[in-house]
Amino acid sequence: MHLITRTANFVLLSPLKTSTIYVTYINATAFHHENAVGHIVYDLPFAVPPGSSTSPRLPVDFGSVGYDEVKGALGGTLKMAAKATVGVRLGKWEERIWYEGAGIGANIRL
């Protein structure tokens, strides 16, 4: 997460060997100790090629509590949970998937 630009980018790991997945939509909220830290809504498609890649910088809407939590972790890592609806496309197949995760480590930078 980047405080000054209020953006976040993610390391993405595709399990596919030859096909590119496209992320078409994200509506996600991150939580720290059950407090909402930030919210991402993004609907510009981006590619996730086979192997490891990095997402574009996605805009984050920090709430007042969330910004303080993130600012307090500046230069370190903040453990968060997340809930999201994510649109994915592979060829002509497209689906929206519900995701819930915990123990996500976010590096906090200026």
Image: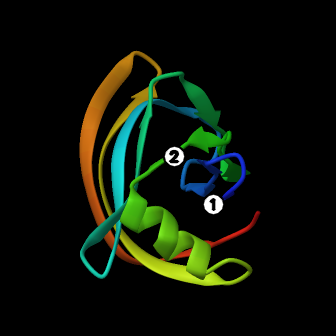
Please name the residue shown 33% across and 54% down the image: 29
Q: Position of residue 6 (x, y in %)?
A: 62, 48
If the image is split into quadrants, where does the C terminus sit?
Answer: bottom right
Q: How many marks?
A: 2
The mark found on residue 100 in the picture is none
Tell me the residue at 56%/48% (across/down): 16
Type of residue at label 1? Met
Q: Which residue is mark 2?
A: 60
Q: Is there a contact, CB below 8 Å, between mark 2 and mark 1?
A: yes
Say which quadrant the N terminus sits in.
Answer: bottom right
Tell me the quarter of the picture where residue 64 sits.
bottom left
Q: Residue at x 33, y 24 (%)?
A: 94
Q: Is residue 19 above or below residue 53?
A: above
Q: Which mark is residue 1?
A: 1
**Residue 81 vs residue 5: left or right?**
left
Percent of width and height locating residue 23? 49, 33
Secondary structure under tag 1 reads: loop
